[in-house]
Image (spheres, rainbow, N blue to C red):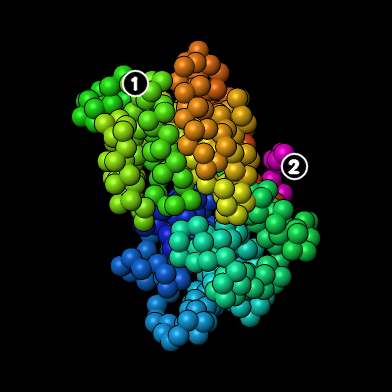
Amino acid sequence: MTRVLHVLDHSLPLHSGYTFRTRAILKSQQAMGIKVRGITGLRHMAEGPDAEEADGILFHRTRGVAGGPAGLREWREIGLLADAIVKLCGEWRPDVIHAHSPALCGAAALRASRKLGIPLVYEIRAFWEDAAVGNGTGSEGSLKYRLTRKLEDHVIAGANHVVTICQGLKDDLVTRGIDPARITISPNGVDLALFGEPTAPEPELRDTLGLGSGPVIGFIGSFYDYEGLDDLIDAMPLLVAEHPAARLLLVGGGPREGQLRAQAEASSAASAIRFVGRVPHHEVERYYSLCDIMAYPRKASRLTDLVTPLKPLEAMAQDKLVAASSVGGHRELVEDGRTGILFAPDNPEACAAALARLAKAPETWPAIHANGREHVRASHDWAKNVHRYLRVYQTLVAIPMVEETIAA
């Protein structure tokens, strides 16, 4: 039976978009009969044993301290993770090492792969130098930005195969000179076994939040600058002018929360805006059930143009309308007028106009709901998408072929 070791930045039981994608991949691979384990680097900072089972998946932890100045510290971090991978592979020999970005994980996995002679798959979920710019911890073109990119190029060159989550990332790699035949796209997906049946709305929760008759515009996620939530708040006075009962429900938290709350309090539409804060992951569907339209007003940037988010797919699976800014990552997921609606980024007026158009045309909602659900089932169901990985593994090791048709 095929064994795959996944090398990760962090994992369950921590909750993040990163860990949820990891869980979906590993659980789907288990369902196919592949034996999987995970190993995390030093940045998995949650307390726990050296080997920890979460949701039926065994994760191994890297121990040690990587001290010193920037650069040397990361080099030591790579070394500790590489040594931990080598040690684990001596106890549990995998057929493939499958490392997931950031490049620190990839570099450690590459070092171990070369030492052990085990093929390496490197999966890029985002370019982390661009993610650092997007979340305010880095600047484009800085020394750190250039070094991160250079390290990732090194890992890509050494890996046996590369996986990305979307066409935007693949196209960027091709412009860097990477052979497209070495790159497979495994798009963001939804585990429809867990997230495919919408939850019935709770009238008491709706009343507690004072959402009234709606329509309710929702955002559930992290409050980073690139998400454009300031534009969404600025759009609310314009929307309320056309639809006085409209409400905005913001669920989550993050670096921009304080500024966004202050902006909402100063808005002329303050009475129409609700902040819920962070909620446990198992309660997220309760809040989805209260929303009519999920809004994703991401700002235009290199990050948002290249990377596809997961949230619009979850919204479609939950029978929600999707209104999203027309950045590259959204254009890969949303077909304007069919599975959702797109509007110009960095433009509160365009956001408000798009939301108003949806709100005033409820007769169009059933068709958009149906198209969105079908899009997720056809192209973003993990039970199907996991076969893309098997094809990659089959090219690297002798794995019996599995009958499965995958769209090119």
Magenta region, mostly helix, strand or loop? loop
Residue for point 52% across, 47% down: 299
Above or below 133: residue 406: above
In the picture of the structure, the residue carrying the numbered disc 2 is 408
Label 2 crowd (10 A; few <14 / some 14-19 / many >=20): few
Give percent across and percent down for residue 390. 65, 52
Q: Is residue 43 above or below residue 256?
A: below
Q: Is residue 407 magenta?
A: yes
Which residue of the protein is positioned furthest toward the top in this rendering? 363
Residue at the image position 51 percent from the left and 82 percent from the top: 71
**155 or 300: nearer the viewer:** 300
Which of the 4 quarters of the picture holds residue 106?
Answer: bottom right
Q: The C terminus lies in which quarter of the figure?
A: top right
Residue closer to the observer: 75 or 273: 273
Look at 28% across and 26% down and name the residue there.
211
**Label 1: few (<14), some or many (≥20) within 10 Å?**
some
The answer to which of 233 and 283 lies nearer the viewer is 233
Rendered location of residue 42, percent (x, y)? 42, 73
Q: Is residue 13 left or right of residue 187?
A: left
From the image, tell me which residue sits under label 1. Answer: 244
Magenta-span inclusion, residue 62: no
Q: As drawn, is 308 to the left or to the right of 220?
A: right
* Residue 54 vertical placement versus 191 (above, below): below
| Drawn side of residue 373 relative to residue 176, left or right | left
Query: What residue lies at 56% left-to-right and 61% top-to-bottom?
Result: 130
What kind of residue is marked 2?
Answer: Ala
Residue type, numbered disc 1: Pro
Instruction: Identify the secondary structure beneath mark 2.
Output: loop
* Of the image marks 2 and 1, the number of the one nearer the N terminus: 1
Are discs 2 and 1 less than 8 Å apart at CB? no
**Which region is colored magenta?**
396-408
Give x and y (percent) for residue 298: 51, 44
